[in-house]
Image: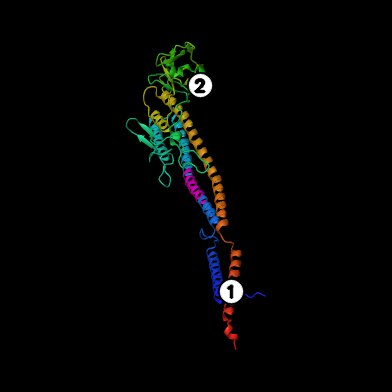
Amino acid sequence: MSIYRVATANTFDRTIQNINRRQSELAQAQEQLSSGKRVNRASDDAVAATLAERAQNRLARVQADQTALEASKSSLTLVEAGLGEANDLMVRARELVVQGGNPVLTQSSREDLARQLEGLREQMLAVANRTDTAGMTLFGGLGGAAKPFLDMYGVPTGVQYEGQIGQYAATETGLPQAVDGNAVWMRVAPGNGNFTVSLDNANQGFVRADQGVVVDAGLAVGLDTGAGYGGYRITMGGTREAPTFEILREITAPPSTEPVPSLPGPQTYQPGTTIEFDGIQLTLTGDPMGIGDPSVPQLPTDPVPNDVVRLTPVDQPTDLFATFQRAIDALRYNGTNQKANITQELDRVLVEMDNGNDRILDTRGRVGEWLNRADSMGEVFADKALFHQKEKSDQEDLDMVQGISDFQNLQLGLQAALQSYGQVQKLSLFQYIA
């Protein structure tokens, strides 16, 4: 049998080391229980700490996207409300313009309507310059101006857009916080979009026309400004009892040498008849001569020889504020051929108001789609945030049930170690020597 010598000092040192290790493990378990985390520092678990930090970074990015989305949603809600208010203003303005076309109105009545339209124009301008709660413009496009719409009273007159034209696009993680106001208010198609119809102020009769339509743009030679044409001139002829009309192309520069179809000569005028030429349809009409004046005999037709109706090609868009001003000026017109001029101008105003309101409604629909997308994006961000929070928790959080069990085991082990150490320390060879 082999006999090993056990050194008391060596045993003492090893026992103390084990007790210290157990105390350290117990202290670590106690720290984990108090913090609720399995990994309190990178030295606890380097791999888990790295993965938890990565999950935290991803969570921070998602939270930043959520914050930006909420800001965009708040601004877009204000944009949608502003466009809804603009639509209400357009409906009211259209009612006033239709009312202004009543031929029995007096000049004072038309002046009252003009003042109401001025008030609506100012309200529309205020909507276009509206800001969000942070003071950022809602219709400033890409930015660049604290007040994107300026009402100029010098040269040039009218409303000028001072914002930066353009629209931020919606992305997978973000939505715009502003809308391009230039596209909403400043890009209205004049007339029917291809040409405008106007009367000469020197006209003596009451002939006028609707806004017309281009049915075949390839045949509308007179609207081709690049080829040296400037529209059409419809000149009334004949007599008041038997009027005629003739259509001529306006020439602004030497036209191209390419042959063009000739227009028909003078034709008999019939009120309310639609005429066709160069792929254009237009209806000439008007009120009988002498309305409201019993001294002038009523005639079945109204044109006076040399009265002119002009068709001018559209070379650039107009804006809704200019359309409002056109209606105001028409209601205040007190020159020659008043009734026909007012009616002709207000007819154009109604078409342009409808065109402008269509742009407002189209933009409102797009903003509504963005708001619907914001709700979907918010749900996606919430799911991502929850996933990254769980990912981070899986790496560093403590299983409390397991943690308590481990703590109790470590506590019991330390207690047993201390008790055994105390009992062994009481043993001594001198106690057994007689």
Is 25 part of what is drawn in magenta?
A: no
Q: Nearer the viewer, residue 348 or 380?
A: 380
As helix, strand or loop, the secondary structure at mark 2 comes to: strand
Asked whether, in this view, residue 413 is left or right of residue 360, the answer is: right
**Callout 2 amino acid:** Val
Q: Residue 417 placed where, x, y %?
A: 58, 74
Is 61 part of what is drawn in magenta?
A: yes
Region of the chain picked out in magenta, as a range: 59-76
Query: Distance from label 2 to label 1 (Cα)?
Result: 102 Å
The residue where tag 1 is placed is: 417
Q: Residue 339 placed where, x, y %?
A: 42, 24
Badge 1 local density, few (<14 within 10 Å), some, or many (20+)?
some
As helix, strand or loop, the secondary structure at mark 1 comes to: helix
> Vertically, is 138 above or below 330?
below
Q: Is residue 97 visible?
A: yes
Q: Nearer the viewer, residue 308 or 207?
A: 308
The residue where tag 2 is placed is: 214
